[in-house]
Image: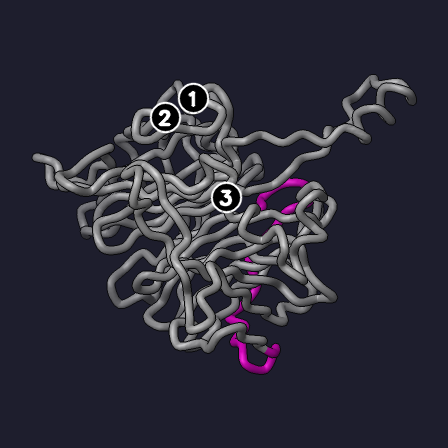
Amino acid sequence: MIVERRVELRFCQESRDAQTHVNLSAVRRDGRCLWVAGDETATIERLTAVTGEDGRVTGYDGQTTIALADLFPLPAGAGEEADIEGLARADGWLWAIGSHSLKRKKIKPGNGDAKARKRLATVVREDNRFILARIPLVTGDDGLPRAVAEDGERTAAVLGLDQDSIADLLADDPHLAPFLAIPSKDNGLDIEGVAVHGDRLYIGLRGPVLRGWAVLVEIRPGSHPRDPRRLRALPIGDDGEPYRTHFLDLGGLGVRDLCPHGDDLLVLTGPSMDLDGPVRLVRWPGAARAGAGSVVAADELEVLGELPHGDGDDHAEGIAVLDEPGTRLLVVYDSPAPDRLTADGGVLADVVDLG
């Protein structure tokens, strides 16, 4: 795919100190604003468009930080990262999802053999990663969207507070259950995208990839009858199950993000483990009309093109449709290459033409 231009995302000093601008993992457009998240904090950021004399967007700044713990309870409290890997927006709600992944400790420079072996044998669970949140959006006096804890009867709510996370829903799944105890970088469970279609959420898995097939999980979340700050997975389909799985032949790649495009889903794809590329943008036509338990062959998908990736950097992690015709897509990168970092402490995202 051809990168049409780059736009600068500018962050405040506090976020730069927290490395949010170099750990971007999710993005969604909301009118003149962008909602973005980094995977090293428990916050969501709102940026506002800056336009040139011709009315074209040249960048985004005016950052506002939303601490998730100010909106709803977090399983491990405000001090632990939530590893937000996907954002979605629809019908006055903002959705945010954690990776739901375990992590294996890295070997650090200078570790001796014994220390290195011990670190590689250590697997860590961080409970804040295992959340799905639904947040009310309201329009402020400035005409910009705001994320709030309450708006009348609408309340920020979360799935994953009481052994009811998406990982818990999959505990007996014949395909995914064996991977729940495996760290994400070892082809274990790793959520990296979410998209809304009506009352359904499509959740994209970077891992596991099963013999070359990527997995999407479909759920229908709703308010919990006993606690307005909790969600539950409502029955989906005629069989009354709380979720469905779909399998896509992405040629061995996993899902890095999802974005609705009419009734289609745009799928950002990339390696499932600690590799750099390839990175492709794929369209799943008619995803919103897909039947239960779809198995989608490669010839039923449309490869829109390749996206740039670096060697140890420039990992495409988030996509968002930028305009109402839906012809341009914004791509944000984790671990951006040095030439993406600006003198003002910003980072450059790509604008690509969908054609």
Q: Is residue 293 above or below residue 6?
A: below
| Front in this rendered view, residue 223 or 82 | 223
- Give how far across and how far down residue 132 sits, in percent: 43, 43
Pointer 1 local density, CA inside 10 Å: few below 14, some 14–19, many at least 20: some
Q: Quadrant of residue 312?
A: top right
Q: Which callout, 2 or 3, points to the residue nearer the camera?
A: 3
Label 2 Cα neighbours within 10 Å, binned few <14 / some 14-19 / many ≥20:
some
Quadrant the C terminus occupies: bottom left
Give the residue type at disc 3: Ser
Viewer-proximal residue among 326 and 213: 213
Find disc 2 in the rendering and name its residue. Answer: 69
Q: Which residue is the site of mark 3? A: 165
Q: Can residue 142 be seen in this snapshot?
A: yes
Query: Which residue does the image show at 52% across and 39% down from the upper left?
Result: 163
Q: Amino acid at mark 1?
A: Ala
At horizontal 87% and vertical 27% (from top left) the residue drawn is: 117
Going by the image, does 113 lie left or right of 119? right
The answer to whether the residue labelled 1 contacts the one labelled 2, judged by CB atoms less than 8 Å apart, is yes
- Residue placed at 26% from the left, 48% from the top? 93
Residue picked out by circle 1 = 78
Classify residue 197 by image quadrant: bottom left
Check disc 2 and give the amino acid type. Ala
Instruction: Find residue 221 and report its horizontal and vertical position in percent.
Output: 37, 53
Q: Would residue 19 be found to the left or right of residue 50 on screen?
A: right
Stretch of the chain drawn in magenta: 297-315
Indicate whether 75 appears above or below 178.
above
Considering only vertical position in the picture, is 215 above or below 193?
below
Residue 21 belongs to magenta span: no
